[in-house]
Structures are given as C-alpha cells and as structure tokens.
Amino acid sequence: MHGLIGKMKAAPGQRDALIAILLEGISGMPGCLSYVVARDPADADAVWITEVWDSVEHHKASLSLPQVQAAIAKARPIIAGFDTHIVTEPVGGHGLSV
Amino acid sequence: MHGLIGKMKAAPGQRDALIAILLEGISGMPGCLSYVVARDPADADAVWITEVWDSVEHHKASLSLPQVQAAIAKARPIIAGFDTHIVTEPVGGHGLSV
C-alpha cells in the first residue's frame, strides 16, 4: 500500500471552503482505500489529509480523474501553501476499504 | 470526530514485531472509525499511526480495553520512543467505518 500524510494551508478564512472542495472531489477514486480530511485545532488555516492507496500508480492516476482535476482547479485560488508531506507504507489496520 | 497522527520509534530491528502487536490489538474498538499502521520508508525504525474516532471519550476508553492493555504491555519493551503527536478534527472522507 501507499500512504500520504500532508498538511495544507488555506488562505485566511477559507479553510471550510477548501475542505468542502476536497470532500467533493474524492468520491469514486479507484484504488483509494482511505482519504480523511481534518482540521488542525491548533492552526485556524491548516488542513490535514491522510490517504491510503493500494498502489502508487492508482494515486498518480487519481490526479487525472475529471472530478479531481475540477477540485484542484477550484481549490487552487484558496490554497496558501503546503507544509508537511510524508510518504508512508501502510501495512494494515481498520477502515481500509475500496 | 477526533483524530490522531503519531510517529513511534521501535527498538532497532523490532519494527515488524511492533507493527504485528499493534495490528493484533486494534480489532473491535468501539467508536474507532479508522486506524492505519504504516512503515516510514525513510526511517527503518519508525511507524506512523493515523487514527479517527467518533469522540475523544471513545479513544480514551479504548486504552482500558483488555486487548489494548495486552498490546501495550507486549509492545512497551520494543518501543524506543514517540516522535510526532498531532491531534486533528476529522470532518469527512472515505474509509471511515464503525
């Protein structure tokens, strides 16, 4: 499996709008086993995204899906930047579903 | 929802043993929506754990469950330390299941 843990900063006051766009874009992504969007309670503009994919290839391919392309285009103006970006190798657990 | 992103270090050479113990201990935890255990490809002793709970209370209560207590006791001798510990507020996504 292929995992990502990332922190993204929204433009000031735009976090909820950014989260709504992220949640719209993620349905029906082949090979996506988990995709969780979370607020950072210690940072009013920060969003954490944790992802698990069955393969690197499916994650890469997801970036070309129409709904993901649309979400990226819509989100770009309200993304202030990217912080943490960690690649992991998930081995198991609970809540991994196709 | 209540989320945790944590990095733990195993004693040298004990990462796979630690992961096996973690995966044994997590089945049937009330209120646990997601619990993913992952290797860090950049650090041979590091394990990432990402968790989503329906509430802080269920997460706290999980630490008293017999199988979790057993896993903690078994894992303690091969845990070298804890690094990152981030609390999040998950708002949605894919792979959140009771």
Image (cartoon, coloured by chain):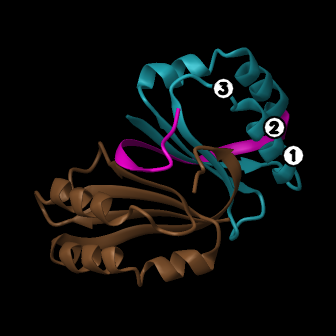
Chain colours: A brown, B cyan
Q: What stretch is highlighted in magenta?
A: B77-98
**Does residue B71 appear left or right of residue A59 in this picture?**
right
- Closer to viewer: mark 3 or mark 2: 3
Q: Considering the image in quadrants, where does the N terminus of chain A appear?
A: bottom right
Residue B67 image point, x, y percent = 75, 21
Q: What residue type is labelled 2?
A: Ile
Query: What's the CA distance linking mark 1 and mark 2?
Result: 6 Å
**For this rendering, which residue is in front, A17 or A84?**
A17
Label 3 crowd (10 A; few <14 / some 14-19 / many >=20)? few
Whether residue B35 appears in magenta in the rendering, the answer is: no
Identify the chain of the residue marked 1, using the numbered disc in the image.
B
Q: In the rendered image, which residue does mark 1 sit on?
A: B17
Q: Same chain, marks 3 and 1?
A: yes
Q: What residue type is labelled 1?
A: Ala
Q: In the rendered image, which residue does mark 2 sit on?
A: B21
Q: Considering the image in quadrants, where does the C terminus of chain A appear?
A: bottom right
Disc 3 to disc 2: CB gap under 8 Å: no
Q: Residue B28 got which mark?
A: 3
Residue A12's image quarter?
bottom left
SS for dot 3: loop
Q: Residue at the left extreme?
A: A13
